[in-house]
């Protein structure tokens, strides 16, 4: 029970690549001719992510996100959009929290998991149908 | 030399209202290190830490007295019943209520829901239920949903730009059709202390009941239900040094007598036949089933502790610390404080660092050992009024020190460094 995991928080979380994605997010915006869009909210902190994407042969050909919230949620969404571009829907459906943790390169506590995975949840919900 | 230093220390002690160093030794968790740093616990409005006196009372009950209450005719049953009823008495005395006027629940939330259900048959189509924009969801949603079910009108008193209830809006919203006015004593986001006696008078002039959410006030100030004049008042044990799972609802005897029970079952019954049932005497009529016995006894121990320190001293200490923190945080560039000036403010400060989400602020503070809350604090309608998704909140209690405020301030400076 001693301090479960010290890297759950502190300035160590805000590593350079996370701050880069937060300050200069990739794929920011909306696709006017999107095939699918999905908005997900995290009631805990008011994070909001809207994903819009285009599919070609069951593959994500274009993807953009809009949103606001904490650095972790926005940086993770930016990384997710990079990651899913070119992937087919089956691959995306198999993506998990662990993939997000790997992208971020930091361990995420159970409370903060909702922030970190919001972008992934939005993408998965969008392609569900 | 050493004796001189000792003497100086003693003099310093006497100028402070509380002997905080001594108080801190009663709270085992305050010795804990977080991320290698001393824990600076400033999330007291969410839940307070527990002194060993409370922890011991709970352990002692389970080790020596555990039995169900009000039914088992054996030594342990007699002991546990006596201890439970003593806890009842301590809790009702603490807010100057009669023994029959205080019901144990699991929390403020349950107390308010109990009311919203048990008062339901007094609310008709076209009646009005009035709350305020600064309510916690637990004093907002139960009334909103009751109004919906009974086709009553749900009205909300506005908060002005200083974080106080808007005088005009109070007058406009409480009318001859109003049946219930429910408001918080202290806002858990703004720290505003509302004038309950005044609102109660206005409510009573319209023949409306006045309900008070005292989750933040009972832990921090002397609350006397007779002096406030309100009809009902709800609070939680865990915010006042007690355990989780125990809360209370005060109600004037005449109201509790005329109200229907909320939960039916064992222990709240006098007589049951095939066709009907008769309710037990107050307060047991509202305590169906086996309650949180150990937690109630823990709350009793928490009240003993608070009374020994003195509620006036606790209030004075929290006010001193809060004023000090307000002054220090105000001096940091690019930090916005929400809510009223210190004069009308209780023991907490909500703030944001410009351009930084409150979650990121609190994560970096945590790295410095400083625990604060971040979010909408279960008050989404208020977040909308303030125009923010989230705020960070530092809330103080009897064991906090000015040195801890200094740690908070330098941690906020660190947040700014990480994000620029
Ligand atoms: C003003 C106010 N009301 C109600 C509550 C709900 O208390 P509980 O969660 O103990 O039911 C809180 C606690 O966060 C509060 O601050």
Image (cartoon, coloured by chain):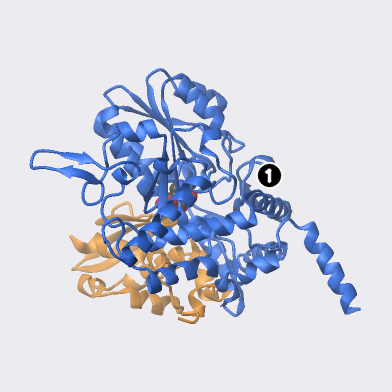
Chain ID for label 1?
B
In the rendered image, is residue A62 in sight? no
Residue at point 52%, 34% (across, down) = B226
Looking at the rendered structure, the number of numbered marks drawn on it comes to 1
Residue at point 72%, 61% (across, down) = B402
Residue at point 41%, 40% (across, down) = B101
Relative height, residue B205 to residue A72 (above, below): above
Quadrant holding the N terminus of chain B: bottom right
For numbered disc 1, what is the local secondary structure? Answer: helix
B69 horizontally vs B33: left or right = left
Of A123 and B242, the residue lying toward us: B242
B209 horizontally vs B196: left or right = left
Q: Which chain is orange?
A: A
Quadrant holding the C terminus of chain B: bottom right
Residue A99 x/y as whole percent: 34, 77
Of B8 and A27, the residue lying toward us: B8
Local packing at callout 1 (Cα closer than 10 Å; few below 14, some 14-19, many 20+) is some
Q: Is mark 1 within 8 Å of ligand 1?
A: no
Residue B257 x/y as whole percent: 32, 34
Relative height, residue A118 to residue B123 (above, below): below
In the rendered image, is residue A13 in sight? yes
Q: Colour of chain B?
A: blue
Residue at point 26%, 30% (across, down) = B121
Q: Which residue is mark 1?
A: B342
Picture quadrant of residue A103:
bottom left
Residue B383 x/y as whole percent: 48, 45
Picture quadrant of residue B178:
top left
Residue B310 x/y as whole percent: 64, 53
Relative height, residue B123 to residue B379 (above, below): above
């Amino acid at each position: 029970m001693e301090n479960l995991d010290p890297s759950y928080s502190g300035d160590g979380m805000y590593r350079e690549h996370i701050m880069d994605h937060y300050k200069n997010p990739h794929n920011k915006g909306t696709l006017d001719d999107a095939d699918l869009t999905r908005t997900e909210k995290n009631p805990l902190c008011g994070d909001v992510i809207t994903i819009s994407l285009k599919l070609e042969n069951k593959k994500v050909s274009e993807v953009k996100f809009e949103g606001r919230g904490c650095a972790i949620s926005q940086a993770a969404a930016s990384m997710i959009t990079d990651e899913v571009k070119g992937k087919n829907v089956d691959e995306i459906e198999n993506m998990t929290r662990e993939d997000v943790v790997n992208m971020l390169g930091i361990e995420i506590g159970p409370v903060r998991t909702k922030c970190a995975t919001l972008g992934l949840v939005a993408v998965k919900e969008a392609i569900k149908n | 030399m050493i004796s001189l230093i000792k003497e100086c220390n003693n003099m310093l002690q006497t100028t402070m209202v509380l002997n905080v160093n001594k108080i801190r030794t009663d709270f085992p968790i305050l010795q804990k290190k977080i991320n290698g740093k001393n824990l600076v616990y400033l999330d007291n409005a969410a839940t307070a830490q527990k002194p060993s006196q409370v922890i011991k009372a709970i352990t002692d009950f389970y080790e020596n007295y555990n039995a169900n209450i009000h039914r088992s005719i054996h030594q342990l049953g007699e002991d546990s019943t006596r201890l439970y009823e003593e806890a009842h008495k301590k809790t009702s005395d603490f807010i100057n209520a009669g023994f029959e006027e205080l019901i144990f629940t699991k929390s403020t939330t349950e107390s308010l829901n109990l009311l919203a259900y048990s008062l339901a048959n007094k609310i008709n189509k076209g009646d009005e239920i009035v709350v305020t924009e600064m309510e916690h969801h637990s004093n907002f949603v139960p009334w909103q949903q009751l109004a919906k079910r009974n086709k009553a009108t749900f009205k909300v008193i506005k908060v002005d730009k200083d974080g106080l209830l808007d005088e005009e809006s109070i007058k406009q919203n409480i009318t001859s059709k109003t049946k219930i006015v429910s408001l918080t004593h202290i806002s858990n986001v703004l720290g505003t202390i509302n004038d309950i006696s005044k609102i109660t008078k206005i409510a009573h002039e319209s023949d409306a009941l006045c309900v008070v959410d005292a989750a933040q006030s009972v832990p921090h100030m002397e609350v006397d239900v007779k002096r406030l004049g309100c009809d009902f008042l709800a609070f939680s044990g865990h915010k006042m040094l007690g355990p989780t799972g125990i809360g209370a609802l005060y109600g004037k005897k005449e109201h509790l007598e005329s109200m229907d029970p909320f939960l039916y079952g064992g222990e709240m019954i006098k007589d049951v036949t095939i066709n009907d049932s008769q309710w037990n005497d107050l307060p047991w009529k509202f305590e169906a089933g086996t309650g949180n016995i150990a937690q109630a006894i823990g709350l009793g121990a928490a009240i003993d502790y608070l009374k020994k320190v003195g509620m006036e001293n606790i209030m004075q200490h929290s006010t001193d610390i809060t004023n000090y923190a307000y002054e220090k945080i105000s001096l940091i560039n690019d930090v916005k404080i929400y809510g009223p000036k210190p004069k009308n403010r209780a023991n907490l400060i909500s703030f944001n660092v410009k351009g930084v989400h409150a979650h990121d602020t609190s994560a970096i503070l945590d790295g410095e050992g400083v625990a604060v809350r971040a979010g909408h604090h279960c008050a989404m309608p208020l977040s909308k009024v303030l125009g923010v998704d989230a705020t960070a909140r530092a809330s103080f209690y009897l064991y906090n020190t000015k040195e801890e405020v200094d740690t908070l301030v330098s941690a906020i400076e660190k947040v700014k460094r990480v994000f620029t």
